[in-house]
Amino acid sequence: MSNKVTVTATVHADRKKVWDYYNRPEHITKWNFADPSWQCPSASNDLRVGGKYAARMEAKDGSFGFDFEAVYDEVVDGEKFTYTMPNGRQASVSFKKNGDQTEVDVTFDPETEHPIEMQKNGWQAILNNFKSYTEAN
């Protein structure tokens, strides 16, 4: 697919901590939502080629929710991974050491249902939430 979208955050933490907080289910459930009115009540992550990632995302008031799932295509431990969603869209996440900070870049194929800018803002909000959670813990 073309028109890939990238969102970025610089996290004030070392790469190992950033990698662990991004990938361990006990942390994913604390940051994987774009807005405080949402939550991620469950997550699982089999971080290996062919392994499955799954996270439940839902409004706290129960009005809407969905399951986000993907299968890993590539995993370079501590550095990057790529996954494919059930609809064929792909995303990749890289973790680059930058002094005592870590730059996290998420690049994804947008879906066709919502405007690209709206999707970019949503993915950026989730990444910003991740940054805040990781730096605070």
Image (tube, grey):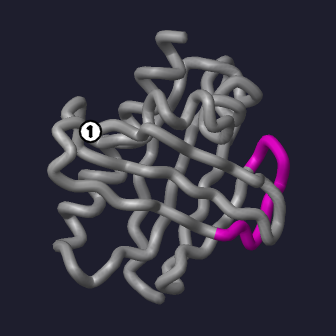
Q: Is residue 69 above or below residue 124?
A: below
Coordinates of residue 57 in the picture (x, y in percent) = 37, 49
Q: Which residues are magenta?
A: 71-79
Q: Is residue 20 above or below residue 45?
A: above
Q: Main secondary structure of the magenta part?
A: strand
Q: Looking at this view, is 72 or 117 the one in front?
A: 72
Judged left or right of residue 61, residue 96 is right
Task: Kindly state the secondary structure of the residue where label 1 is placed.
Answer: strand
Name the residue carrying label 1: 38
Q: Amino acid at mark 1?
A: Trp
Coordinates of residue 42 in the picture (x, y in percent) = 51, 42
The residue shown at (67%, 65%) is: 82
Looking at the rendering, which quadrant does residue 101 occupy?
top right
Q: Is residue 2 above or below residue 102?
A: below
Q: Looking at this view, is 31 or 60 the one in front?
A: 60
Coordinates of residue 27 in the picture (x, y in percent) = 58, 29
The residue shown at (19%, 61%) is: 118
